[in-house]
Structure formats: C-alpha cells, structure tokens
Image (cartoon, rainbow, N blue to C red):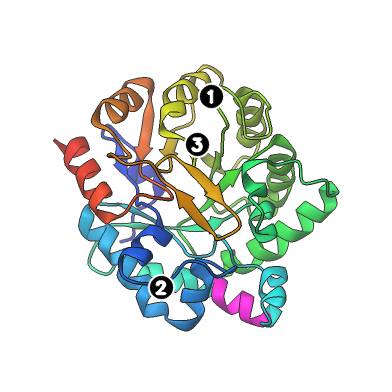
C-alpha cells in the first residue's frame, strides 16, 4: 500500500531528493534549453526515470517531478503545443512513479513559480508586475492537469513572494483533497527573495487547508537555519528544506555559478535538524552523491 506524507513524517528526518537538473547533467544531458528538465522529459522520459532512480538508490524518500518548467505558455514559446505541455505534466508524474517501483517513496508534483517561464531569474526576485488573476489563471491550468496525474502530493516550490503565495492558496482551494507543501526562495535568513518577512509568507501558505508542510528551497544553505527558526515561531507545520549548493543563477546561459566544497555541510544539516526541520534534501547543484551523504548522516 502506498504511504502518505503523514506516514512518512515522524520521529526521524525525511530524506528528500536533490536537483533533478544537476543529476541529469551528471549523466550527460544538457540543461541550457529554456524548457530545462522539461525538454528531457519530452525527448527522453526514461532518462528522467533513471535520474529519479539515482536518488531513490541514494536514500531519498520523496521524488520531486520534472514539471517545474512545464506550462502551456512555455511550451508555446518553444514551438510546442499546449496539449504537449499537458501531456508532459502527466508524464512527469509517471516518470517519477516508475522510479519508485519496489520502494516506499512518495511522488511530489513540482509546481514551479510563474517567474520560471520568464527565463530571466524572476523566480529569485518575485513581484513580477502582473495582475493577481494572471497568476491564478497560470497556476490553475497546470494544477488541474497535475492533479489528474494522481501525485502523492504537490511540491509548490521556489515561490519568491507573498503575492504569488496568495494566488496559489486560492488555486489550491480547488484541490483541497490533495496534500501540498509550499516552499519559498529567500534572499537572506529572514526574508523572501522579494524582501517580505518570511513569517508573512508562512501565514499565507498555512491558510490553505491542504498545505501539510512549509519550507525553503533553492536558497543559499547559510540562510536556512535562521529561516527555519523564524518559521517555527509562527507555525507548527512540518518544515521541509532543500537549499541549492549556493552561488548565483545566470539566466544568460541557464547555469549556476556554484562555489566549491560540500553544499550540504554536516554542521549545517545538524543545525537544521536542531532548529526543527522535518525533511531535508537539495536543490540546484546537489546530485545523488550529495543526497547519499545526507542520507548516511541523517540515518546514522
């Protein structure tokens, strides 16, 4: 019987996967396409499954799908049909599910921010200058399709500001039977990328009855401890964290300038656990080797 998020979150810290794009790059796939992992998903879905499987073998118990960059608008701009985008959204769940055969893992359908389709780093700035209804409409059409693919939960991730969080809470209300987490991108140890107090973002995310966890992702690891502690003051929901490896995203060539050294240092992970993290993984710049090391630390 398939486990649920409630089954998974308990006395021990849950191991999440790492950056799907990073693992694909380690297997020789180029990530410089505007559709990012979505391009590999369309052209070679078995490669997506293989990358997911790498994380399962590394010890991950939650797999985040390749749907982050998939949208009708984004596909149309890339010369593909809106129908192809819908097919890819469902295929992303199927590709991840195929990697969990024989394993007790959950599939979390990635719901990336509106800013990701702009290809200019907007997901790390927020406040896009578009009307709230435009954000609602953008996310509603994607969520309608993703939910039909029957993921175990929705990973609403890399949200840079409270404005987009409010739009997402409205859309999540139409799918109140599907559990979700909402994680924010942050610019320091106390504020979202758009500069709002992280406490305000948590209040908004927590207002959705099906949000079962909150957290931080694709953020400098050094900021995470302070953010967890601030979140814990205003919410009792489980906190999930999956920071990037540090560095700066370049929209010019779709690459990360990642510093050298271990991205998820032992002393940082230990502090995240003490601060109250319920689930820990990695984002951009973290591969299956990093997650394997993390799993050994957390299970040890």
Q: Nearer the viewer, mark 1 or mark 2?
A: 2
Q: Position of residue 63 (x, y in %)?
A: 38, 57
Return the mark for residue 95.
2
Mark toward the start of the polypeptide (1 vs 2): 2
Closer to the camera, 146 or 117? Answer: 117
Secondary element type, mark 1: loop
Q: Is residue 192 left or right of residue 99?
A: right
Task: Give the crowd class for mark 1: few <14, some 14-19, many >=20 residues within 10 Å.
Answer: some
Closer to the camera, 166 or 175? Answer: 166
* Outermost residue, left side: 300
| Residue 202 falls in image quadrant | top right
**Quarter of the image where the C terminus is located:** top left
The residue identified by callout 1 is 235
Q: What segment carries the magenta color?
A: 83-89
Distance Cα–Cα, label 3 vs label 2: 25 Å
Q: Nearer the viewer, mark 3 or mark 1?
A: 3
Task: Answer whether labels 1 and 2 touch (C-beta < 8 Å).
Answer: no
Q: Is residue 59 left or right of residue 247?
A: left
Q: Position of residue 40 (x, y in %)?
A: 46, 75
Q: Is residue 147 left or right of residue 164?
A: left
Question: Up-down: is 231 above or below 38?
Answer: above
The residue identified by callout 3 is 216
Task: Give the crowd class for mark 3: few <14, some 14-19, many >=20 residues within 10 Å.
Answer: many
Looking at the magenta stretch, what is its main secondary structure?
helix
Secondary element type, mark 2: helix
């Amino acid at each position: 019987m398939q486990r649920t998020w409630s089954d998974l979150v308990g006395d021990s810290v849950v191991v999440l996967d790492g950056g799907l794009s990073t693992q694909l790059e380690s297997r020789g796939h180029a990530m410089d396409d505007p559709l990012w992992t979505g391009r590999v998903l369309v052209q070679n879905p078995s490669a997506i499954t293989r990358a997911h499987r790498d994380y399962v073998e590394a010890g991950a118990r939650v797999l985040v799908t390749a749907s982050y960059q998939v949208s009708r608008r984004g596909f149309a701009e890339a010369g593909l049909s809106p129908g192809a985008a819908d097919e890819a959204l469902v295929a992303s769940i199927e590709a991840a599910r195929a990697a969990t055969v024989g394993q007790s893992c959950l599939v979390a359908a990635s719901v990336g921010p509106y800013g990701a389709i702009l290809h200019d780093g907007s997901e790390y700035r927020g406040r896009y200058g578009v009307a709230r209804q435009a954000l609602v409409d953008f996310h509603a059409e994607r969520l309608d399709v993703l939910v039909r693919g029957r993921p175990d939960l929705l990973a609403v991730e890399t949200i840079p500001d409270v404005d987009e969080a409010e739009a997402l809470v409205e859309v999540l209300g139409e799918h109140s039977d599907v559990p979700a987490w909402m994680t924010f991108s942050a610019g320091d140890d106390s504020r979202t990328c758009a500069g709002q107090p992280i406490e305000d973002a948590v209040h908004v995310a927590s207002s959705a009855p099906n949000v079962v966890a909150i957290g931080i992702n694709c953020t400098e690891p050094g900021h995470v401890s302070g953010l967890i502690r601030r979140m814990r003051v205003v919410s009792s929901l489980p906190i999930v964290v999956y920071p990037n490896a540090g560095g700066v995203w370049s929209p010019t060539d779709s690459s990360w300038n990642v510093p050298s050294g271990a991205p998820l240092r032992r002393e940082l992970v230990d502090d995240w656990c003490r601060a109250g993290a319920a689930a820990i993984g990695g984002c951009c710049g973290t591969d299956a080797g990093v997650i394997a090391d993390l799993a050994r630390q957390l299970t040890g």
